[in-house]
Amino acid sequence: MNVGNDNLDGDAVLANVNPSLTLIKRCRAAAAAGQPRRHTPCCIRSCTAKPCDRCPNRGQRCAVRATRVRERLFMKHAASRELYAYWEERRGTRPAPERSEIEPGAIRGVLSDAFILTVDSDAGHPVRLAGTRMCALFGRELKGESFLDLWGAGSRSIIGSLLAILADECTGTVAGVTAQNASGDPIDLELLLLPLGTRRPAFARTIGVLAPLKVPAWLGVSPVGKLTLGGRRHVGAALEKRLLPRFMAPRGRRGLVVYEGGRGRSPQPAGEDGPNAA
């Protein structure tokens, strides 16, 4: 006997029941009075397959899969979630996929908000490719421009640090971003930065998304000014290993070392030559 889906009242609905079976009068009265029915399947699960974060080893949970799901749920914009899911699929168990493995046709719905940067701190991480809506946000073609120059003075150094972490540790970032046009109208955006693997450091690239959470009517007509970075969170392989990427050099004070952004490696007391880097 197959069990169908639950109804809105929470009672199990039985399907394909033998039509020759009928309830006796006493059972009908009990059902009408709202009393619990006997022999109701109380522990039969739905036949619909659902994704699970359980590990193949019985009694354990797969921390890698659970971490990936949590990271994707943290992202607000659909373009960020789609690109991150595709990036995860392509990388498999590696820290990052090769840039030659990224097929534009597979992420067609993301391209208008996507960009690719050259990882080159001396040149300000130039923009190699930028989607049409990202260019419309600034009112100009962004190819060849310094990515760091798109940010305000208070955010530029932090973006540079995040891109350095991305290049050194293959750790991505998802962050909130705000901006204003010349009239002072605000816009909220989401930034996603993901590393791409390469065998030659000179060809290092990063792929990302800069997407408005809500598209204003003036987008494409009135360009925004400098971007301001908001709250951020690291994503990627380093999180699966329960390691926190470095974010800022420690500040020492008479034998004490203060770290910004959480607990990393065990700090060592500062010596005569100053504090040790994280």
Image (cartoon, rainbow, N blue to C red):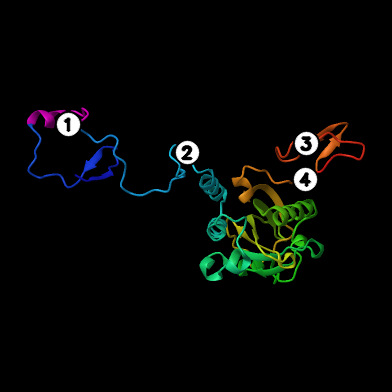
**N-terminal-most mark, 2 or 4:** 2
Q: Is residue 240 above or below residue 186?
A: above
Which residue type carries mark 1? Answer: Ala
Left or right of 3 in this view: 260: right
Mark 3 or mark 2, which is nearer the start of the sequence? 2
Specify the amino acid type for callout 2. Answer: Gln
- The disc placed on residue 60 is 2
Q: Quadrant of residue 114?
A: bottom right
- Disc 3 is placed on an element classified as loop
Disc with the residue nearer the chain's start (4 vs 1): 1
Badge 3 amino acid: Pro
Left or right placement of residue 249 versus residue 132 in this view: right
The tag on residue 267 is 3
Q: Position of residue 173 (x, y in %)?
A: 65, 52
- For label 4, the crowd category at 10 Å Cα-Cα, with few meaning under 14, some 14 to 19 and many 20 or more, is some
Q: Earlier in the sequence, mark 1 or mark 3?
A: 1
Q: CA distance from mark 2 to mark 4?
A: 35 Å
Say whether marks 1 and 2 touch (CB < 8 Å): no
Magenta residues, start to end: 25-38
Q: Where's the N terminus, which quadrant?
A: top left
Q: Nearer the viewer, residue 103 or 144?
A: 103
**Does the residue at mark 4 contact the one at mark 1 (Cβ under 8 Å)?**
no
In space, the residues marked 4 and 3 are separated at their CA atoms by: 13 Å
What residue would you read off at disc 1? 31
Mark 4 and mark 1: Cα distance apart in space: 66 Å
Residue labelled with disc 4 = 248
Mark drawn on residue 157: none
Residue at horizontal 72 percent and vertical 52 percent from the top: 165
Residue at position x 54%, y 49% in the image: 68
Report the residue at 89% width, 39% height from top. Answer: 274
In terms of secondary structure, where does tag 1 sit? helix
Of residue 24 and residue 260, the one placed in the foreground of this image is: 260
